[in-house]
Structure formats: structure tokens, C-alpha cells
Image (cartoon, rainbow, N blue to C red):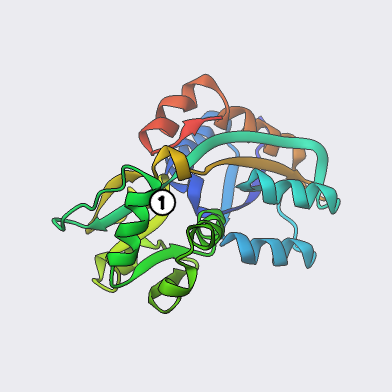
Amino acid sequence: MQTTEIKVMASAAFKEAYLELVPEFERATGHKVTTLWVPSVQMMSRLKGGEVADLVIMSATLLDELIKAGIVAAGNRFDLAKSGVGVAVKSGAPKPDISSGEALKRAVLAAKAVAYSTGPSGIYLVGLFQRMGIADAIRDKAKISQGFPAGDFVARGEAELAFQQISELLPVPGIELVGPLPPDVQQITVFSAGLHAGAKEPDAARALVKFLTAPAAAPVIRKKGMEPA
């Protein structure tokens, strides 16, 4: 069996499921997977700047932008998982009421500081806080993470609430998930894999996608706080 090295560039939302599944793929196929974990904002600029990976994993919305730009091969977007935005507090801290959009708004206004990321969940929250009419009120108490989980701010006591994809909050030590955003303000993001138009190992990259989207991967994806796409 010919073995190859697959280069993957990925954002962190799918990381926990990926880290469990990829070693199984490597054992089963003999292929080696090299992964670069890059925040979405940086990934877009690096890929648009000419950097090449065999496979790109990020939100479907951003991947579609790369398809339009001819960077990801047309017809080669493969949906992996769906994730909602969650809210977390420091372990042992009281959990605020987030049962509705109005309750969430009160909790955000009451917090001394709130944390979110530069990724898809953070972009959504900026718009949500504007729609709620509280963007100006919380501007000075927003802590924004890039390249590390928003939950780290809460674990260190620098913020009371952290917002991020549930799959990115669950593995952070020292915090507890309060729950997903209430249904009336929830945003579900689809995370997808895309084959780079300049992929050096397209066949091996497709084999990895097939493994990540196989029925056997579904229980791992669920365990890590996402739903199979």
C-alpha cells in the first residue's frame, strides 16, 4: 500500500473529534496526516495569499467563499458536522438563566466581562448583541480570543461568561457549560472539509474525508459536542 502525507489546515471547532478519529485513519490506511490548527481569520488570509494544503476544514460559509475564489476545488465541499454556540461559566460559579433571548441579554448585561472568539461564533455574537441593542453597553467588557479558546478567559477569572462552539468549550479545564444558546437566538454552523484546488495528494485527502463522514465517526462527533452533518 502506498502511503502519503496529507496536509490539513483546520479551525478548532472540529478539533476534538478530529484528534480522536485521525489516528484511527492513520492506522487503517498507513497515511500520515499533518495538521495546522489556524484561526479562521488567519486561515482565510493565508490561503488567499497562496498557501496550499491538501484539505481545508472550516465553516461551510467561509469554505464557499474559497470555492468562489477558486482556492477550494468546485464540487469538493464535504460537510462534516453541525455545531451550536454554547455559554460557559467558571467551574462552581452560579449558572445564569439563558432560557430565552431576553434572559441571555440580562445575563450578558449583568456580567463584568464576556468572552468570545474571532471565529464564526464570535462573528455571529457581535451581530446578535447589535440586534439586542447592547453592543455599546458591552463593548468595553468584551474579551476576544484568537488562536485559543474563549473559555480560557473564564477559567482565569478574567470574564464571567464565555461564548463559543460547544465543541470548543467542553474540553477547556476549569469551566462548566451552562448550555446552548436559547433556540430563539441560536446559530447552527456547519463545518466542512474542502479539497484545495492545488492539493498534492487529492486521493488520500478524499480518503480522509470519507473516513470522517463515515457512520462509524458519528458517535465520536456527538460525544465531542457536535452533530454529524
Residue 123, can we see it?
yes
Can you tell which quarter of the image residue 139 is in? bottom left
Mark 1 crowd level (few <14, some 14–19, many ≥20, 10 Å Cα): many
Q: Give the farthest residue toward the top.
A: 215
Left or right of 133 in this view: 153: left
Q: Position of residue 173 (x, y in %)?
A: 25, 57
Q: Position of residue 116 (x, y in %)?
A: 44, 63
Q: Position of residue 183 (x, y in %)?
A: 43, 38
Q: Give the farthest residue toward the left.
A: 92
Nearer to the camera, 100 or 220: 100
Left or right of 151 in this view: 37: right
Which residue is painted at 48% across and 40% down in the image? Answer: 83
Left or right of 220 in this view: 120: right
Residue 197, can we see it?
no
In the image, residue 180 above or below residue 136: above
Can you tell which quarter of the image residue 213 is in? top right
In the image, residue 208 above or below residue 200: above
Quarter containing the N terminus: top right
Identity, as a three-letter code, of the amino acid under mark 1? Glu
**Number of labelled discs?**
1
Can you tell which quarter of the image residue 46 is in? bottom right
Nearer to the camera, 75 or 151: 151
Q: Position of residue 223 (x, y in %)?
A: 36, 33
Which residue is painted at 68% across and 39% down in the image? Answer: 205
Nearer to the camera, 194 or 114: 114
Quarter containing the C terminus: top right
Residue with the mark numbered 1: 168
Q: Secondary structure at mark 1?
A: helix
Which residue is painted at 13% across and 56% down in the image? Answer: 92
Which residue is painted at 72% across and 37% down in the image? Answer: 77
